């Protein structure tokens, strides 16, 4: 299977005064609402740290080659509802039932049924697979379906894989998750087809030609309200009205375990140049509320700010005098510096009492991830960061280059398998031709697996040969065999 870091890239935009630069326009825009769960936010830091522990444990178990990495990566902490979430209203089925789903870049399964049950309609196709995902402080399990998913009236995705929860925990007040992380994160979530991956909503929208690029633009604006319609996802491009300045490209890191997610490399300085965190790898995650730093970087942040830990909220606390002297943090990402001002570092004071704090105190959104730097999972840039910068999660740009490189590497294997699929001895397709074709093949993965086309032993349609090349690149020999068994002439 191709690693997520080879398929994905991340962009950020500085929100500073400048003329907007249109990168790509898309008409598919979905509003997002930020919701503060006042029943659980007293555990705001604990929730984020638990999630960080789980994400790391899951990635490390997967990288170790454990077949049951989903069950190995269990963090024994109390189940807690999501504290701060961004919610999208998504339709499922025809006629569509509207579900309130958490937008999560740290996972890739889409599922419903936590509060409002999944409703079977004429477009529902039940599969033979069960599905289960654990999120650190919550989980769900149920049955995998294919169904129509309506993002907006302009983006309706037929036969999208979606989980129908039979049981769930930690998701009070919402219906499930729309997962927009790297597709590899779905590996191992199905049973008995444990080796299958599940193309995300974005993958399928792109493969069907519903959006022009496999790209998401996300805008989260700071708010002082408990619930506010203050965000937007743009499918297939960016919304130039949501940012000023230019988009800066940052490749997804190759350093594990951050490489399993939307991981990047960055360094952080305080004020005039005090280094808080030397360049290292971590992740960008919409499922995390705070900015979490490695324990040694967190200690340096405390030292330079004079902050103390607040026992009531678990967050760092400053006096008003200290806050008046608080300096900006500067994030250096792929040679571009992003300024994170003093106000950006502070929790909104109007929401202090909602997290168990005192109205007049100043609380900071920088927390301790709990492990030292240098371990490949040294920070999480959560909502607190994303609310200050327009972010673009792109799976298109590096994918083409990576597939070409890998296709040359797998050339001999491809040329053995393609003739076998075509039923011909020795007559194959050159790896150079397949390398060009494979650029588009991954996006057709689901369509390919589900097409009911009888195979002629004398020849195989060239389009299917291209798709087969992509399957080889994904190290999915089992998927090829399964496809042949499932698509024999009726």
Image (cartoon, rainbow, N blue to C red):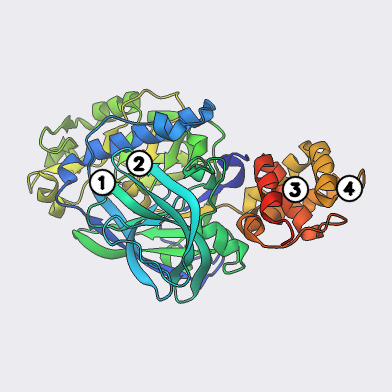
**Up-down relation of residue 365 to residue 396 (above or below):** above
Give the camera-side residue of 386 and 329: 386
In percent of width and height, residue 187 lies at 52, 42
Q: Is mark 4 on a helix, strand or loop?
A: loop
Question: Residues at badges 3 and 1 in contact (C-beta under 8 Å)?
Answer: no
Q: Is 454 on the left or on the right of 90, as rendered? A: right
Give the camera-side residue of 294 and 399: 399
In percent of width and height, residue 208 lies at 61, 66
Q: Name the residue under label 2.
A: 135
C-alpha gap between disc 4 and disc 2: 45 Å
Give the camera-side residue of 304 and 231: 231
C-alpha gap between disc 3 and disc 4: 12 Å
Q: How many marks?
A: 4
Question: Residues at badges 1 and 2 in contact (C-beta under 8 Å)?
Answer: yes
In percent of width and height, residue 389 lies at 40, 53
Residue depicted at x 35% and y 35%: 52
Image quadrant where one finds the N terminus: top right
Question: Residues at badges 3 and 4 in contact (C-beta under 8 Å)?
Answer: no
C-alpha gap between disc 1 and disc 4: 52 Å
Q: Is mark 3 on a helix, strand or loop?
A: helix
**Residue pushed farthest front?**
490
**Up-down relation of residue 269 to residue 234 (above or below):** above
Residue depicted at x 44% and y 28%: 278
Q: Is 318 on the left or on the right of 329, as rendered? A: left
Q: Name the residue under label 3.
A: 469
Residue depicted at x 23% and y 36%: 46
C-alpha gap between disc 2 and disc 3: 33 Å
> Is residue 400 something that shows in the picture?
no
Q: Name the residue under label 4.
A: 428
Give the camera-side residue of 81 and 397: 81
Q: Earlier in the sequence, mark 3 or mark 4?
A: 4
């Amino acid at each position: 299977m191709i690693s997520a870091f080879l398929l994905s890239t991340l962009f950020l935009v500085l929100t500073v005064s400048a003329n907007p630069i249109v990168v790509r326009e898309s008409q598919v825009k979905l509003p997002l609402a930020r919701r503060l769960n006042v029943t659980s936010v007293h555990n705001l830091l604990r929730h984020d740290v638990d999630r960080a522990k789980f994400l790391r444990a899951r990635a490390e178990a997967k990288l170790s080659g454990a077949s049951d990495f989903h069950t190995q990566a269990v963090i024994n902490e109390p189940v807690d509802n999501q504290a701060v979430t961004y919610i999208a209203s998504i339709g499922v089925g025809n006629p569509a039932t509207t579900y309130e789903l958490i937008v999560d870049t740290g996972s890739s399964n889409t599922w419903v049924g936590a509060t409002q049950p999944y409703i079977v309609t004429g477009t529902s196709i039940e599969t033979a697979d069960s599905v289960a995902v654990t999120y650190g402080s919550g989980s769900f399990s149920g049955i995998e379906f294919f169904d129509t998913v309506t993002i907006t009236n302009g983006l309706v995705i037929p036969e999208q894989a979606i989980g129908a929860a039979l049981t769930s925990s930690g998701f009070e007040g919402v219906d499930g998750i729309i997962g927009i992380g790297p597709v590899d994160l779905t590996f191992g979530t199905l049973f008995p087809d444990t080796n299958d991956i599940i193309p995300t909503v974005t993958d399928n929208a792109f493969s069907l030609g519903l959006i022009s690029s496999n790209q998401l633009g996300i805008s989260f604006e700071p708010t002082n309200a408990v619930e506010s319609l203050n965000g937007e996802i743009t499918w297939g491009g960016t919304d130039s009205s949501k940012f000023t300045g230019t988009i800066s490209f940052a490749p997804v890191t190759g350093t594990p375990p951050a490489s399993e997610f939307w991981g990047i490399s960055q360094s952080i300085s305080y004020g005039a140049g005090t280094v808080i965190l030397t360049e290292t790898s971590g992740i960008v995650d919409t499922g995390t509320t705070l900015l979490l730093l490695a324990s040694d970087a967190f200690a340096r942040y405390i030292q330079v700010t004079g902050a103390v830990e607040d026992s009531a909220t678990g967050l760092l606390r400053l006096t008003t005098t200290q806050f008046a002297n608080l300096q900006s943090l500067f994030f250096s990402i792929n040679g571009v510096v992003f300024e994170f001002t003093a106000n950006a570092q502070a929790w909104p004071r109007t929401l202090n009492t909602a997290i168990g704090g005192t109205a007049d105190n100043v609380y900071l959104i920088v927390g301790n991830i709990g492990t030292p730097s240098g371990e490949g999972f040294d920070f999480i840039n959560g909502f607190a960061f994303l609310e200050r910068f327009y972010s673009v999660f792109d799976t298109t740009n590096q994918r083409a280059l990576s597939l070409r490189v890998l296709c040359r590497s797998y050339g001999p294997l491809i040329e053995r398998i393609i003739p076998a699929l075509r039923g011909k001895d020795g007559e194959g397709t050159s790896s150079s031709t397949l390398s060009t074709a494979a650029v588009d093949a991954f996006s057709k993965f689901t369509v390919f697996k589900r097409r009911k086309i009888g195979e002629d032993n004398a020849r195989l349609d060239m389009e299917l040969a291209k798709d087969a090349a992509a399957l080889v690149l994904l190290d999915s020999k089992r998927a090829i065999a399964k496809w042949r068994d499932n698509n024999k002439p009726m």
